[in-house]
Amino acid sequence: MPDMFPATSLFAATERVHHRVTSALVDGFSQWWQMPLLVLALAAIALFVLWMYRRDAAELPRGIGLVLAGLRLGALAALAAAYLDFERKAEHEILFPSRVAVVVDSSASMTLEDDPPGTQPADGAAISRGGRALEVLERGGLLAALAPTHEVSVWRFDADAEPLVVLPAAGAGEKAAASEAAAQAVDGSAMPPAGWQERLAARGFETRIGETLLRVLDQEPAGTLAGVILLSDGANNAGIDPTAATASLAKAGVAVHTLGIGSERLPANVRVADLLVPARVFPGDRFPVTGYLQPQGLAGQTVRVELVDTSDGRAERTIDTTEAALGVDGALTPVRFDVPAIEAAGRHALTLRVQPPAADRTPADNQQTAEVEVVDRITQVLLMAGGPSREYQFMRNVLERDKSFAVDVLLGTASSGISQDARRILDRFPTTAQELGEYDVVVAIDYDWRLLDQAAQARLERWVAEESGGLVLVAGNVFMDAWLADTETAVLRNLHPVELRRSNAVRLGERPGYEEPMPLTFSRDGQEAEFLWLGASRISSQTVWSEFPGVYSCFDTSVAKPGATVYARVEPPGARSLGSALSDEGLIYMAGQLYGSGNVLFLGSGETWRLRRIDDAVFERLTTQLVRNVSQGRLLRGSRRARVLVERDRYAVGSNVVVRVVGSEGAAATAAACTATGPDGATVRVALLPEPGRPGVLQGGFVASREGVWRIDVELGDNADDTISRRIQARLPDRELERPKLDRGALDQIATLSGGSAHYLAQAAWSPEDSRGLAARIPDRSRREYETGAADGGFKRGLNAILLALGTGLLCCEWVVRRLVKLA
């Protein structure tokens, strides 16, 4: 998970050291009478000494007798101190401070703006739910109010939960100052340094409150967790029931205090929730465009919708208009347009606009733009395979039937004179860079790369990195382990987005496949990658994938290379019993990476043809989408000097968008500035830095924090007129759109079951007084523990030397005095 955990420890403690001198003899007493007996024995010895000197010095002056008795008692005291065995030990006082976990919702629904009047910033700009949560922490003084008594761990959560930072509590001598800082927190002067706040940006496609509470209870220190403060709209839509998790916290004595952010009644509004257009079409082809409207408080009303061509450099042109009847609150209303042929090649921006009723409160979301590229060229595909496997045959048939592809084939085991349904049948890999440059995509299915010499391998690598070639690498059980053992195929190993090693199954002599299918488990990136969608939306695609039983084999690799994206994994039967040989997450089945200016996709086995058991159209859709996705670098050529590449055209709100600028034909890219303009017109500067290991490639990134179309502009060199642009679309996930309202009932139930309190920010802004009142309800659960260290050997040796010197010195002095007074 990126470094998912902060460097600050989740269990902080302070320590003070005290030194204590004790008697090993006395500490060893186990009976009550031993200490009184020791005292009586010492007293008896002292009385005996006094009695003896009273007799011996009866004829001497009284002062001389007292001196002699004192010297003898001093020597005996030194002897008694040595006998008592005094030692010094270090006593460690460890303070475990009280802990409060502040858990902030970072799901995509927190990007909504529904603040009531009176809670807007001074400049009048709208503020999102996530922005209000951050204001509660800072301007509202919540962190400062907790600081005098508790240390605070700040968490973010959506589909998963992540601790961000632990803010230390004020020391005992700092409590008064901290209290004063809490009172003045409204100016932000008491806040800790910034850095973790940016990670609270809303970006998740699910809200899992229940799982988050359980994880907080599990990872926070037991015994000192005094409470949990939950800032959320309460719209739980995945995972376990929050009430079950709340019961666990209540059993542990940890109260949950909820701060509800959002509105129970959203303002009347109709928004363009999504706009689906094909990524590429051909001149003369009609194509469908589907938009989705989401109403609030306008059920049953009819609105007028128009589709407009708003491409840069062209006059705005209305393509079609229609009317749509709005459904119930939150329901998506589809609007479909059948777009006639667009003859002009290039990128066209299509904008869907809705003319809302007068009651509409948010005009900013009444339109959405998506881009379609009209390409007047056919995608050239080189299909390579070690042999005529089922994956090869079915993929070749699909690409051959599609008029947008031209397919040449290269079979490693084929003899001369074979017949294949393809444009050309090659008998060798392209021998020159010009021949290879004719292709947009190379698909290699379990190909024996030993057939390519090192010059051909280097030619393939340059084609991908410098000429934006698309490469699909499909693992297999026939040739892959053989070429992996060959040291001259290092270039091909580098092209793969996963770490390759020879399969354990081959070394152990086991069967490379399994008798039971292994279902594919998609990562968050895999669920958002539209080229893997088997339906019109992410939800419908997941439904289709759930019908797929799975694959029967997968190459043994579980580690992705830095910068690669894992889309799907599988878990072999009995993987848990194999120990550390496999990753806890399973084997990688689908992964991809941007390699220079090209795109590389890896499949763990050639079994996507098994999708045909669901429907032939499903396999055909996946095949064409995979090939078109990896070919985007060749088709999006823009400027002659450079190209702007992103991983995909559509992102979830809050996702990190990685931007790469690649020089054309191997030339180094020199970008003077890169900016990303959001749907609200706000501009974000994107810092471009050289990508490690990729000369001539610049890389940067930004967070798509708002829904809508983002335009990425890159100025090349010092010429502001030489600018290349790329558009992406950020959209709210489906689950976050289903229930965007504040769920007051869920938050009340969490607070009541755990013994906490519920607060809502819908009526008024949160103030420092509110923060101090909430902090006063949370008990101090700090505790002290004491640990005694080992005895100080140097102290004992020094003390014994002093006692020995003192005892012998006093006895010597006594002998001298006795001789001087002529006492026997």
Image (tube, helix red, strand yellow):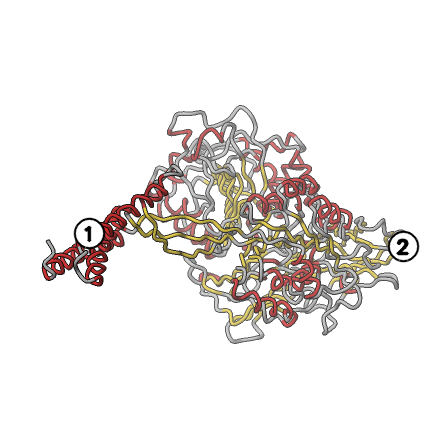
**Quick one: which residue is furthest to the front in this view?**
59
Q: Residue at x 66, y 57 (%)?
A: 730
Between circles 1 and 2, the one closer to the viewer is 1
Estimate how packed mark 2 is, as few (under 14), some (14 to 19) or many (20 or more) residues with alpha carbons within 10 Å. few
**Quick one: which residue is furthest to the top in this view?**
515
Judge by depth and name the residue closer to the eye, 54 or 317: 54
Does dot 1 land on a helix, a strand or a loop?
helix
Task: Measure how far apart labels 1 and 2 are at the Cα level.
Answer: 122 Å
Confirm whether residue 689 shows in the render: yes
Question: Could you tell whether 236 is left or right of 13 in the image?
Answer: right
Question: Could you tell whether 405 is left or right of 774 in the image?
Answer: left
Judge by depth and name the residue closer to the eye, 137 or 491: 137
**Which x, y percent locates residue 452?**
38, 42
Q: What amino acid is found at the position of numbered circle 2 in the picture?
A: Gln
Question: Could you tell whether 169 is left or right of 235 in the image?
Answer: left
Does dot 2 land on a helix, a strand or a loop?
loop
Q: What amino acid is found at the position of numbered circle 1 in the picture?
A: Arg
Q: Residue at x 69, y 58 (%)?
A: 111
Judge by depth and name the residue closer to the eye, 412 or 138: 138
Estimate how packed mark 1 is, as few (under 14), some (14 to 19) or many (20 or more) residues with alpha carbons within 10 Å. few
- Callout 1 touching callout 2 (CB < 8 Å): no
**Which x, y percent locates residue 518?**
56, 31
Confirm whether residue 437 shows in the render: no
Q: Quadrant of residue 344?
A: bottom right
Q: Residue at x 79, y 64 (%)?
A: 116
Residue that mark 1 sits on? 55
Tell me if residue 542 comes above or below residue 435 in the rendering. Answer: above
Give the mark nearest the N terminus, 1 or 2.
1
Residue that mark 2 sits on? 301
Tell me if residue 62 comes above or below residue 494 in the rendering. Answer: below
